[in-house]
Amino acid sequence: MQTSEAIKTRRSIKKFKPDMPPRDLIDQVIEAGVWSATGKNAQAPIIVAVTDPGVRADLARENARLLGQSEDFDPFYGAPVILVVLADKSVFTHVYDGSLVLGNMMLAAHDLGLGSCWIHRAREEFELPRWQTWLHSLGVQGEYEGIGHLALGYADMTPAEKPRKDGWVYRVD
């Protein structure tokens, strides 16, 4: 798929099939994130790939709680894979850098025939001691801010294209 076509046709998926994508497809999505541009090439972001159903369920419960929903609400729309993007707080551009990682991964997922959706509340989630301890148990050292979760899997819906609003571009010639 051409990059411009991927950009124009990618949509946020809010209903996923339970089928786990093959590891090589997940790794290709992650690789797109790893190769994202970062301020001064500081490479502040990290990606935590969650395919373990138990950990995924814990993240979903915590995220639902932060959203003010009941524990049985799934803020990840049934996606079997959650790619958590965090970034080193000591790097001035960490939020922007992590956002680019998420954007690259969403485009790569679409190109590979997978659906994705950026889910918020990672910042709030990973400020909690429980999740900081979990990161440390994975070997993550330093202070990281949660930028977003990428819900990833096979789409079980076809979202409609929404028209672009007016006023996106102003020219100075």
Image: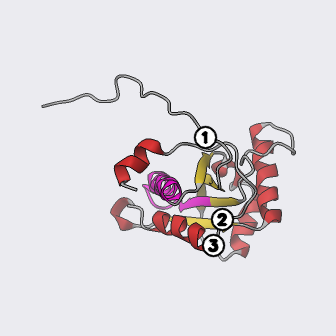
Secondary structure category for the residue under label 1: loop
Q: Is residue 44 left or right of residue 152?
A: left
Q: Position of residue 109 (x, y in %)?
A: 53, 57
Which segment did they paint magenta?
84-111
Q: Nearer the viewer, mark 3 or mark 1?
A: 1
Give residue 23's mark: 3
Of the pair 69 and 137, the residue shown nearer to us: 69
Secondary structure category for the residue under label 3: helix
Give residue 158's mark: 1
How far apart, in angstroms, are the residues tagged by discs 3 and 1?
24 Å
Does label 2 or label 1 sit earlier along the sequence?
2
Q: For the point 17% across and 30% down, which residue is it? A: 172
Circle 1 Cα neighbour tier, 10 Å, few/some/many (<14 / 14–19 / ≥20): few
Three-letter amino acid code of the residue under disc 3? Arg
Determine if the magenta segment contains residue 79: no
Q: For the point 69% across and 54% down, which residue is it? A: 127
Q: Is residue 4 left or right of residue 19?
A: left
Of the pair 91 and 22, the residue shown nearer to us: 22
Q: Tell me the chief SS of the magenta region.
A: helix
Q: Position of residue 145 (x, y in %)?
A: 59, 56
Circle 3 Cα neighbour tier, 10 Å, few/some/many (<14 / 14–19 / ≥20): few
Dot 2 and dot 1 residues touching (CB under 8 Å): no
Three-letter amino acid code of the residue under disc 1? Thr
28 versus 126 height, above or below: below
Determine if the magenta segment contains residue 85: yes
Q: For the point 45% across and 27% down, which residue is it? A: 163
Dot 3 and dot 2 residues touching (CB under 8 Å): yes
How far apart, in angstroms, are the residues tagged by discs 2 and 1?
18 Å
Three-letter amino acid code of the residue under disc 2? Pro
Residue farthest along the bottom direction in this orientation: 139
Residue on which the image places disc 2: 21
